[in-house]
Image (cartoon, rainbow, N blue to C red):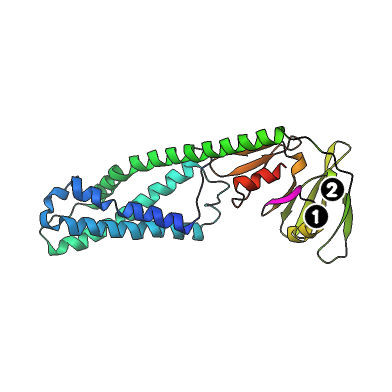
Amino acid sequence: MNKPYYFNPSIKFKSKVSLVFGFFFSFLYIFEPFTLSTFKEYLFDYTLGIGLVTFVGTLIVLIIPPILFKNYFNENKWTIGRNLIYIGLCIIFIGTILWFFGQFFKQETTIKHINYFTFIYYTFLVSALPLIIFISFNEKNIRQKREETAKEINDFKNAKLEVNLPLKIVIISSENNKESFSIEVEKLVYITSEGNYASFFIIENNELKEKILRVTLTKIESFLKDYDFIIRCYKSYIVNTKYVNKVAGNARGYLLKCNILDFYIPVSRKFSKKSLLTLVK
């Protein structure tokens, strides 16, 4: 349940998922589960309505909550467990809308309307198992693809010849240009930012030391633009790829590992396999 899971923020992806769920009405129309066999001449209209309501309801629950609750839907913290809880709430929400739709639809017919809790129970029976299977398969598929790509990149890196470049010194100035310090590029491991400040982590006497300066990563990039082995791999990280020993992958995305660090540095989703290869060139 705590395994990382990829939360796809793409509106296009969410629209496709909603459309697939909307077409589920065809299953109900063909197999007539539960009480649907009593609908007779109303069956197609009712199941078509279920399809339309499901499409709209799914689109709403996939788009609106991540906008309103950004911290909960943080893709770097998203897990299978969170995804299952989210799906459970989505099923209840969509089931509730469908129950009201059924009540409205049946007003003009002689069809008996079942109670709310029975309807929600039926909704879970129809949707829960296929969704759990889909989540498990999707997580495994995405994770394996990224692990395979990470292995290929690591093999590529291990096959390269190491090239020692001459020492270079760069002067980094603050946002208002009132403060500055010089760093030896070859000793810079990574830079991270929080708010208006950037932390530079530099190897000195075999120890990782931190220097802080009031400056944005965008401005720092301009000072380091001539060094193609130093890249901005994430919105809040710049890393010296010479210290990257391994590329790892999970369902959320790719991660960079440096032996001298006790954590992984995240990689932006914009990096393709080809771009990842450049990180270790």
Residue 179, image x, y percentages: 88, 61
Which amino acid is tagged 1? Leu
- 146 falls in the magenta region: no
Dot 1 and dot 2 residues touching (CB under 8 Å): yes
Residue 253, image x, y percentages: 58, 44
Above or below — where is 225 with respect to 139?
below
SS of the residue at dot 2?
Answer: helix
Q: What residue range appears in magenta? A: 224-234
What residue does disc 1 label? Answer: 224
Which amino acid is tagged 2? Val
What residue does disc 2 label? Answer: 185
Residue situated in front as seen by the camera: 155 or 174: 155
Count of numbered tags: 2
Q: In the rendered image, is residue 49 in sight? A: yes
Q: Residue at x 19, y 48 (%)?
A: 30
Q: Residues within 10 Å of mark 2 (few under 14, many from 20)?
A: some
- 231 falls in the magenta region: yes
Residue 243, image x, y percentages: 76, 40
